[in-house]
Amino acid sequence: MSRIGRLPIAVPAGVKVELNGSKVNVQGPKGVMSREFSPLIGIALEDGQVIVTRRSDMPAERALHGTTRALLNNMISGVSAGFERILIWDGVGYRAEMSGANLVLHMGYSHPTTMEPPADISFDVDAKARQIKVMGFDKELVGHIASLIRKVRPQEPYLGKGIHYLGETIRRKAGKSGKGKK
């Protein structure tokens, strides 16, 4: 039995879970999410908890068991508390700012890069701490938008300039040795 899949998911107060066959709708204070799951996996709502089960030990069902439970847990915690990813930028002259709801990045190119947030995603910039926060209730979408921001100027290994996630370790490389032969 999957160690992740067998754990029940507690439904917090203010979150409403509806099961319609293999389709699950979750509604909370942050938003509404809906997702269709595989019919091989059983999803039940018992005593304020969501329980994910499988019928057999077939490899396809075993693979879906923990994944289904993790996706459901992300949906429930997303609509109740939300998710955020924090990015940090380093580099002389690099900066980020808000223009209305849009994020404007000045990352050493000849032009600024403007990123418009999709629905249910918001940005926050702290110029003093050099941080960009990507916030929303859909964990997949928050991570995707954060990766798109990071791709504007990925961290480079020699000088350490660019955009990286908070807590990400960047392997630094040694530059040229500087010895000249005569």
Image: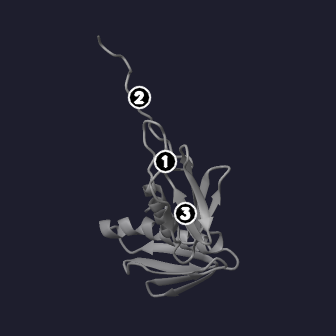
| Quarter containing the N terminus | bottom left
* Residue at image point 44% right, 65% down: 66
N-term mark: 2 or 3: 3
* Residue at image point 48% right, 67% down: 140
Residue for badge 2: 174
Residue positioned most to the top: 182
Residue for badge 1: 162
Where residue 144 appears, as percent x and y from the top left, is: 46, 65
Cα gap from disc 1 to disc 2, whole angstroms: 17 Å
Given residues 37 and 144, the one toward you in this image is 144
User: How many C-alpha atoms fall within 10 Å of the one at disc 2: few (<14), some, or many (≥20)?
Assistant: few
For the residues labelled 2 and 3, say whether their Cβ atoms are less than 8 Å apart.
no
Cα gap from disc 2 to disc 3, whole angstroms: 32 Å
Where residue 31 appears, as percent x and y from the top left, is: 61, 80
Is 129 placed left or right of 25 in the picture? right
User: How many C-alpha atoms fall within 10 Å of the one at disc 1: few (<14), some, or many (≥20)?
Assistant: many
Q: Kindly identify the amino acid type of the residue bearing the numbered disc 2.
A: Ala
Cα gap from disc 1 to disc 3, whole angstroms: 15 Å
Given residues 16 and 66, the one toward you in this image is 16
Secondary structure at badge 3 equals: strand
Does 31 appear above or below 98? below
Q: Please identify, in this view, whether the residue under mark 1 or under mark 3 is nearer the observer.
A: 3
Residue for badge 3: 104
Location of residue 61 by image quarter: bottom left
Q: Kindly identify the amino acid type of the residue bearing the numbered disc 1.
A: Gly
* Residue at image point 61% right, 65% down: 98
